[in-house]
Amino acid sequence: MGRRFRLLPTAARRFGCAFSSSIPAGGHRDGTASLSGARGLGYVEFIVAISILGIVLGAALPTITSRPLGLAVDIQDLAANLQVARELAVSRSLHYRLRVVNATQYVVERGQLNADGVTWSFPTPERSLTLHPNVSFDPASLAPPLSAEFDTRGRLVGGAEPIFTLDDSVRLWAKQVAVYTSGMVQKL
């Protein structure tokens, strides 16, 4: 038939069974299985189900959340690089400029005072940065070359206050960073 075991009187009372000398492992004396004692998933089955769920979520989560993070990270980097360009201009008594090269790249450039002692040129970039995939500068704002130049006091050079707009082409989101005449950088 099946394996037989003896229930001790305390175990029999705990599980609501009458004390018996031998009960088959299947449940009843006649060898049929009992469903009345079934309580759902066992501990091992529960752990296996949670593990499988964790693996599936672990594989899917980066794909779900990576797109908005790309735009958030790029807007944070752009604002930070504008602030760094301003701080470098003040600390080194030179002009620094952040210039958009194309729809997906921008550079931070150190200025060099020309021979006339008035104008500045920017021969070499100090940093060159590329945006995440699916993130780009707004094409409408790139018509005149978009840049922010800071003088030795950290103020913006030029009359117009630039607004840098980044677009996420997948989610159709846009975020902006503005540079004010005082040199203050703010995410909008």
Image: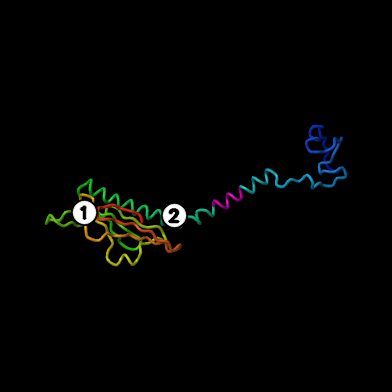
Q: Is residue 54 magenta?
A: yes
Res 31 → quadrant? top right
- Relative to residue 10, is residue 87 drawn left or right? left
Res 1 → quadrant? top right
Q: Residues within 10 Å of mark 2 (few under 14, many from 20)?
A: few
Magenta region: 51-58
Q: Report which residue position mark 1 lands on.
A: 111
Q: What residue is shown at x 82% (from left), y 32% (from top)?
A: 9
Mark whose residue sits in front, 2 or 1? 2
Q: Is residue 122 magenta?
A: no
Q: Which mark is residue 69?
A: 2
Specify the amino acid type for callout 2.
Answer: Leu
Q: Earlier in the sequence, mark 2 or mark 1?
A: 2
Residue 141: x and y in percent read 32, 65
Q: What residue is shown at x 58% (from left), y 53% (from top)?
A: 56
Q: What residue is shown at x 76% (from left), y 46% (from top)?
A: 38
Specify the amino acid type for callout 1.
Answer: Gly
User: Tag 1's secondary structure?
Assistant: strand
- Above or below, 136 relative to 46: below
Rounded to the nearest angstrom, the CA distance separating label 2 from label 1 is 33 Å
Q: Which mark is residue 75?
A: none
Q: Main secondary structure of the magenta part?
A: helix
In front: 3, or 147? 147
Residue 138: x and y in percent read 35, 64
Residue 98: x and y in percent read 28, 56
